[in-house]
């Protein structure tokens, strides 16, 4: 966990939702650093004018939730900003949610109400864990890109065939590729698999 020692440390999960503007991440990261916090995990995006952030931060010494919340709120300088602070309580040796391989799911079709409900219901019933999902809308069309972990015991061909049956009802097409194949065949891949690429080569 970088230079922060674990024995005397305290760790939090911080989530922020606020209208987007320049400098939000700079402000939050500065506030945490000034408190002595080491940001050891972060995911941030902007969606339709809203800035969303979730991160984990570790402190070498005591740091109260109140002090942390106050520092982040001050950095955001927006009374309507939503800030959630929670003590990190996931066991250190916790096994992965799903033991399996990572795949990229793509869906393409006309924007339709209920497509994501149907797809995620199918995946959940198969024991597939969704770890990331993005929808790109272009007029009446929509492209979904999902990052999922498929249990090793499942036949990926059967999963793909079943998913195709689900999306066909909505006039969509779909594809499932192992993340390594996806990255080789696509010039632009999902950010997280790219960052992890060295682990899978």
Image: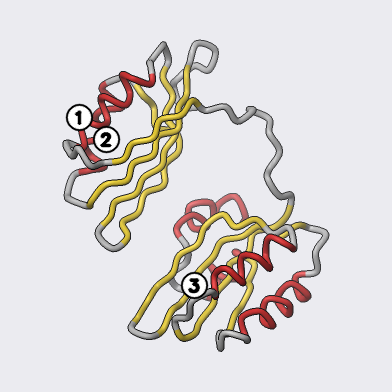
Furthest toward the bottom, the residue is: 171
For disc 3, the neighbor class at 10 Å (few under 14, some 14 to 19, many from 20) is some
**In front: mark 1 or mark 2?**
1
On the picture, is 47 further left or further right than 111? left
Helix, strand or loop under label 2: helix
Secondary structure beneath disc 1? helix
Residue 163, horizontal then vertical, whole percent: 68, 76
Whole-percent x and y of residue 178? 64, 67
Q: At 59% across and 50% down in the image, what residue appears?
A: 199
Query: Label 1 to label 2, Cα distance in Å?
Result: 9 Å
* Marked residue nearer the N-terminal end (2 or 3): 2
Q: Are marks 1 and 3 in contact (CB under 8 Å)?
A: no
Q: Which residue is mark 3?
A: 144
Report the disc number at residue 74.
1
Tag 3 secondary structure = strand
Q: Is residue 62 above or below residue 140?
A: above
Q: Is 123 on the left or on the right of 157, as rendered? A: left
Q: Earlier in the sequence, mark 1 or mark 2?
A: 2
Taking the spot 63% from the left edge, 73% from the top edge, the residue there is: 176
How much space separates mark 2 and mark 3, taking CA atoms? 30 Å
Foreground disc of the pair 1, 3: 1
Residue under pointer 2: 28
Picture residue at 57% right of the left edge, 70% below the top = 182
Contact, mark 2 vs mark 3 (Cβ under 8 Å): no
Which is nearer the eye, 1 or 42?
A: 42
Query: Would you say the residues marked 1 and 2 are in contact, meaning their CB atoms lie under 8 Å apart?
Result: no
Determine whether 147 is above or below 163 in the image.
Answer: above
Picture coordinates of residue 31, whole percent (x, y) = 25, 28
From the viewer's perspective, is residue 57 above or below residue 197? Answer: above
Asked which colour scheme the image uses, the reply is: secondary structure
Where, quadrant-wise, is the C terminus in this rendering? bottom right
Mark 1 Cα shell of 10 Å, populated few (<14), some (14-19), many (≥20): few
């Amino acid at each position: 966990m970088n230079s922060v020692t674990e024995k005397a440390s305290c760790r939090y999960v911080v989530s922020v939702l606020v209208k987007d503007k320049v400098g939000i991440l700079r402000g939050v990261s500065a506030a945490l650093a000034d408190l002595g916090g080491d940001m050891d995990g972060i995911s941030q995006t902007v969606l339709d004018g809203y800035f969303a952030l979730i991160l984990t931060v570790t402190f070498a010494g005591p740091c109260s939730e109140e002090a942390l919340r106050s520092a982040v709120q001050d950095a955001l300088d927006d009374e309507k900003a939503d800030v959630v602070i929670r003590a990190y309580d996931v066991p250190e040796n916790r096994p992965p949610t799903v033991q399996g391989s990572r795949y990229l799911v793509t869906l393409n079709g006309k924007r339709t109400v209920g497509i994501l409900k149907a797809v995620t219901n199918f995946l959940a019933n198969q024991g597939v864990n969704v770890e990331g999902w993005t929808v790109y809308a272009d007029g009446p069309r929509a492209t979904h890109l999902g990052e999922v972990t498929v249990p090793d015991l499942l036949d990926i061909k059967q999963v793909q065939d079943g998913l195709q049956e689900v999306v066909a009802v909505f006039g969509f097409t779909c594809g499932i590729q192992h993340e390594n194949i996806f990255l080789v065949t696509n010039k632009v891949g999902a950010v997280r698999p790219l960052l992890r690429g060295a682990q899978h080569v």
